[in-house]
Amino acid sequence: MLTALFNRTSARYLAVGAICAAANNVIMIAGDAAGMHYWAAVLLTFLVVPPSYMAHALWVFGVRISWAAFAHYVAGTISSFGVMVLTIGLLRGVLSLPMVAAAPIATVAMVLYNYLMTRWAVYRGGSSQTSPFVEPTV
């Protein structure tokens, strides 16, 4: 039953997205706890970009990785960076919420946006061949 669930694109997307969101939140919260300004912590979250692209391309959408698709994924991530910066700036900078609240709220704000950008990047730059890691769906 669990295998059937994770064979679906949406479930795989949510699994990878949850891991990436958790990593981003850990970076933001740990950076804040270490006294780092939230803008610097936001920049550190870009460490998650290369492994997240590979997971989305190969496992979630089942297409081969390519530099063109990675460039589109980075473009989508940079545009999503704006959503994070605005949300964190408002919640942490203006409203002075603690980062343990601001980071998860910013994550929720980015989920739909990130899904749309990831799908655009992977399908636009990827080849039509399927990944060897995912069986084609019928």
Image (cartoon, rainbow, N blue to C red):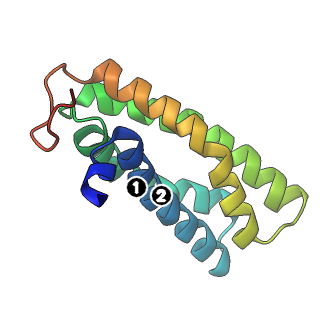
Whether label 2 touches label 1, CB < 8 Å: yes
Say which residue label 1 marks: 15
In this view, 95 is above or below 73: below
| Residue at 71 percent of width and 57 percent of height | 105
Q: Amino acid at mark 1?
A: Ala
Q: Quadrant of the N terminus?
A: bottom left
In this view, 68 is above or below 64: above
- Residue 6's disc is none
The residue closer to the viewer here, 83 or 111, is 111
- Residue 18's disc is 2
Mark 2 falls on what kind of element? helix
| Residue at 66 percent of width and 73 percent of height | 32
Q: Residue furthest bottom?
A: 34
**Residue 135 location, x and y as percent?**
14, 38
Left or right of 27 in this view: 110: right
Residue at mark 2 to residue at mark 1: CA–CA distance: 5 Å
